[in-house]
Image: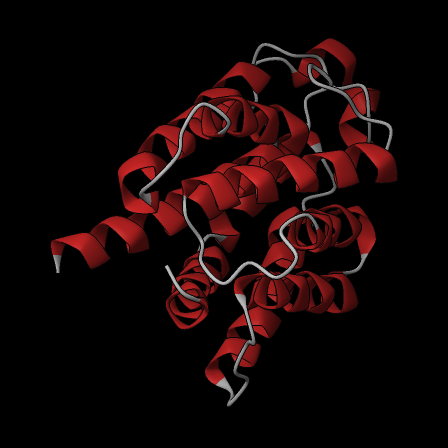
């Protein structure tokens, strides 16, 4: 997938993430401030505007770096820092990449995960977006080759990571104050991470079908 097609894919992701605001808000109201969905909507609206403009990325890495910078500048709060860092750190780890294939995505996700680790203090099991991201990284690192072929496995792994957060007690953020009352609820940040990969998968597999 070249930079232009990756731009189209991320435009699809941005549109679907904006539309996901109500469900993200609903789940964040259960265990957080209720503003996660609004923050993601704000960030991805800005990304959608960027990608609808005449911006032409030089390569895949610079495209994803620009997306991360846009999110960081517009979202604010912890989510802006975390998801902006995911994209920026991931992009830096695939510097110069002209194509997005399964191996490049694996490197992007692993680099993004390391950036998030360095930025925050959360670890797997803390009921954060890291739980979905780690699951995706672990599967992605076993795959190589065609992106459309392997994205379903990566997206499914992230979704299972979200499911696993229901059995975790939050140790960071607003949800930390709930203690065991956070049990049974999925983490909204993990949901956002899984949604991003799900929507990437939708676009990639529809491209193949077309």
Q: Quadrant of the C terminus?
A: bottom left
Q: How is the image coloured?
A: secondary structure
Residue at position x 43%, y 63% from top? Answer: 6
Residue at position x 72%, y 35% from top? Answer: 32
Pick the residue in front: 114 or 37. 114
The percent coordinates of residue 20 (x first, y second) are 46, 52
Pick the residue in front: 194 or 108. 108
The percent coordinates of residue 198 (x first, y second) are 39, 42
Pick the residue in front: 155 or 89. 89
> Would you place residue 187 above or below residue 6 in this image?
above
> Would you place residue 164 above or below residue 162 in this image?
above
| Residue 26 shows in this picture | no
Image label count? 0
Residue at position x 67%, y 57% from top? Answer: 39
The percent coordinates of residue 24 (x first, y second) are 54, 44
Residue at position x 66%, y 69% from top? Answer: 66
Q: Residue furthest left?
A: 210
Q: Is residue 178 left or right of residue 29?
A: right
> Would you place residue 125 above or below residue 154 in this image?
above
Q: Is residue 149 left or right of residue 185?
A: left
The percent coordinates of residue 33 (x first, y second) are 74, 42
Q: Quadrant of the N terminus?
A: bottom left
| Residue 57 shows in this picture | yes
> Would you place residue 79 above or below residue 6 in this image?
above
């Amino acid at each position: 997938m070249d930079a232009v097609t990756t731009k189209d894919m991320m435009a699809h992701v941005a549109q679907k993430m904006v539309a996901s605001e109500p469900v993200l808000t609903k789940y964040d109201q259960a265990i957080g401030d209720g503003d996660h969905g609004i923050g993601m909507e704000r960030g991805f609206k800005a990304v959608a505007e960027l990608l609808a403009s005449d911006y032409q990325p030089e390569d895949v890495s610079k495209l994803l770096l620009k997306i991360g910078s846009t999110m960081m500048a517009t979202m604010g709060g912890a989510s802006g820092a975390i998801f902006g860092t995911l994209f920026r750190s991931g992009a830096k780890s695939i510097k110069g990449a002209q194509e997005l294939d399964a191996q490049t995505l694996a490197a992007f996700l692993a680099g993004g995960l390391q950036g998030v680790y360095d930025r925050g203090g959360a670890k797997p099991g803390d009921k954060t977006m890291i739980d979905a991201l780690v699951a995706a990284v672990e599967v992605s690192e076993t795959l190589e080759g065609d992106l459309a072929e392997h994205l379903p496995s990566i997206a499914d792994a992230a979704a299972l990571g979200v499911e696993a957060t229901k059995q975790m007690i939050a140790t960071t953020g607003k949800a930390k104050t709930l203690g065991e009352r956070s049990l049974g609820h999925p983490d909204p940040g993990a949901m956002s991470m899984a949604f991003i990969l799900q929507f990437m998968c939708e676009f990639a597999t529809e491209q193949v079908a077309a």
